[in-house]
Amino acid sequence: MRRVYLDNNATTPVLPEVLEAMRPYFGERFGNASSIHHHGQETRAAVERARESVAALLGCRPAEVVFTSGGTEGDNLAIFGLVRPGDHVISSTIEHHAVLNSCKHLQEKGIDVTYVPVDGRGLVDPDDVRRALRPNTQLVTIMMANNETGVLQPIEEIGKICAEADVYFHTDAVQAASKVPIRVKQIGCDLLSISGHKFHAPQGVGALFVRKGTTLEPRFFGGSHERSRRAGTENVPGIVGLGKAAELALKGFETREDREIAALRDRLEAAILHRVEAAEVNGKGAPRVPNTSNIYFDYIEGEPLIISLDLKGLAVSTGAACSSGAIEPSHVLTAMGLRPDRARASIRFSLGKQNTGDDVDFAIELVPASVARLRELSPLYNKNATQAV
């Protein structure tokens, strides 16, 4: 059976070039990067080369890059490394659970958190952030790109507001890295999280940009790794893979690979909406990363559609992989004002570097037919069709 993977916001396949770069560090180049002998210095050099590559992707100094295990750890280090009792934090209603659950934990410890809303397109209003500021506001954490809808937030405007108020600004850029150019100086953030497996590096490695002069309390205690910001022996193969993926992402921007992916995404959307009635794009009209489309299909449930498509060889999702199996509708879509039934009827399609026009054609053929079959079984759809006649 042919299988097509369109769930790249959940995770991406490791590119052959990335795997090849990592391969020596599983075998002959096995040294501990903290050792001073040849074996250790060999791997130390590889870690620092990767740091330079990640810094180039983010537009920062290599010394401002802290390697982590991924986006969740980066978000946690940014939040818990800065916030203390008596502080106030501002976030949004559509953040990834790595941020939302961190903020919830802060609240359980007695720290005030304000969650600014989004409009029907899924966008935060920077003025809401400004109005939420207090004298004791320590941190604003607003994501760069939403993992479910792909909507890009106005983080440069938010960064200016934070700078004017002398408040730390963190952005979760896990779903933005490699999809849109990132320049931390232009954004004006103090901290920024990325995760390798979202852009064709391996799972289990990521990075946190920490602006020079920003003092974080570490979450791990042990050695003085990562300039005493993240203790623990470095994951050298993963870090090397992250560095190579960062290099490939920069080359992708040079060749306008993002435009090619956006064209595939737009063709997928247009064809599905043309063939399926009572369907629409969530986040329509807002700026989005080029690879992501989130579409609701009225009168059906999303999970049966995902299962139906998977049985025919197409992998898509209802949203965040870490929320798979959740009974409640997406907090992102309900925050945008979608009815619970429409939120549960929404499907996310997310493309990667490996996807082709043939993959999109495969999805265009399968999705309308699968939606039609599920609607035939839907009493609500049949009732609506009868009333229309």
Image (cartoon, grey):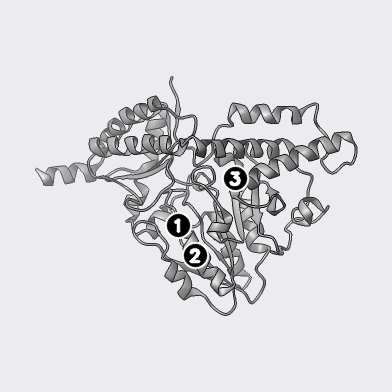
For residue 172, say whether it is visible: yes
Quadrant position of residue 389: top left
In the image, which is nearer the foreground, mark 3 or mark 2? 3
- Secondary structure of residue under mark 3: helix
Residue shown at the point (40%, 62%) measured from the top left: 118
Residue 249 at what x, y percent from top left? 55, 38
Q: Residues within 10 Å of mark 1 (few under 14, many from 20)?
A: many
Closer to the camera in the image, 232 or 67: 67
Residue shown at the point (62%, 58%) measured from the top left: 191
Q: Quadrant of the N terminus?
A: top left
Closer to the camera in the image, 324 or 84: 84
Q: Residues within 10 Å of mark 2 (few under 14, many from 20)?
A: many
Q: Which badge, 3 or 1, is on the more N-terminal residue?
A: 3
Residue shown at the point (55%, 41%) measured from the top left: 198
Residue 138 at what x, y percent from top left? 61, 71
Tags 2 and 1 touching, CB below 8 Å: yes
Q: Which badge, 3 or 2, is on the more N-terminal residue?
A: 3
- Tell me the number on the disc at residue 153: 1
- Determine the CA span between mark 2 and mark 1: 9 Å
Residue shown at the point (39%, 51%) measured from the top left: 287
Q: Is residue 5 above or below residue 177?
A: above
- Tell me the number on the disc at residue 262: none
- Secondary structure of residue under mark 2: helix
Q: Residues within 10 Å of mark 3 (few under 14, many from 20)?
A: many
Q: Which residue is mark 2?
A: 158
Q: Which badge, 2 or 1, is on the more N-terminal residue?
A: 1
Q: Which residue is mark 3?
A: 57
- Determine the CA span between mark 3 and mark 1: 19 Å
For residue 235, say whether it is visible: no
- Secondary structure of residue under mark 1: loop
Identify the residue at the far right of this view. 37
Residue 100 at what x, y percent from top left? 54, 60
